[in-house]
Amino acid sequence: MTPNPFILCHFDSAAFHSGTGFGNRELRRLDRAREKGYFDARGRANQKLKESFGLWCWRLKIPLVWFERQSPRSKFGRVHLELFTTSNRLTAGGQEVIRSLCAAFAVNGHPMVSAHNADCDRVPLRRVEDLAKAILRSALRNHERDTHDGLRRAASA
């Protein structure tokens, strides 16, 4: 099998996955997630794969975006954004952009958006991947450095 030159960090993935016990199918899912920038958690046995993808995002300091079904046989999905893997937070404008994206894609959904994460539910499955892509792009464009000023003020008091 020849390595795909378009997969980000493909050659580091062997060392990255050593000892994980992932099979070829799981490794392909992780490679696909690295290519796209977001993880499709609609399959089975996702917790370890999500953790592995989250660790990869943390190492690269990029936002963690993943999506899943609302329930095993649901027609709707849920998209998650976490900025805890970066040292950034969403700007107020970025939060509004993500709220509007969720409102445009979701059916009667109630997006929960903060400076550090976002959850958008009740997204039709046929559009869930498009929303994940849009949220990732928005998070990469509309962020600012998180200075943790509140923590510094509390520690100095």
Image: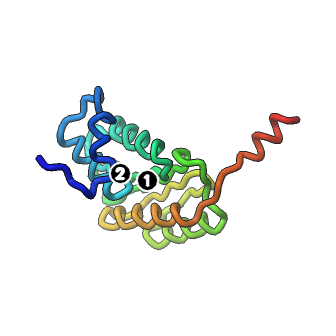
> Residues at badges 2 and 1 in contact (C-beta under 8 Å)?
yes
Residue 132, compared with residue 11, is above or below; it is below
Q: Residue at x 42, y 60 (%)?
A: 122
Residue 56 appears in which quarter of the rendering?
Answer: top left
Q: Residue at x 65, y 54 (%)?
A: 145
Instruction: Give the labeled residue for mark 1.
Output: 65
Q: Is residue 157 left or right of residue 32?
A: right
Q: Residues within 10 Å of mark 2 (few under 14, many from 20)?
A: many
- In primary-sequence order, the first of circles 2 and 1 is 2
Instruction: Give the labeled residue for mark 2.
Output: 39
Q: Position of residue 116 (x, y in %)?
A: 59, 51
Quadrant (top left/top right/bottom left/bottom right) for the C terminus: top right
Q: Which disc is residue 45 wearing?
A: none
At label 2, the amino acid type is: Phe
Residue 155, compared with residue 74, is above or below; it is above
At label 1, the amino acid type is: Val
Q: Position of residue 26 (x, y in %)?
A: 23, 41
Residue 16 appears in which quarter of the rendering?
Answer: top left
Q: Position of residue 132 (x, y in %)?
A: 41, 61
- Give the farthest residue toward the top: 19
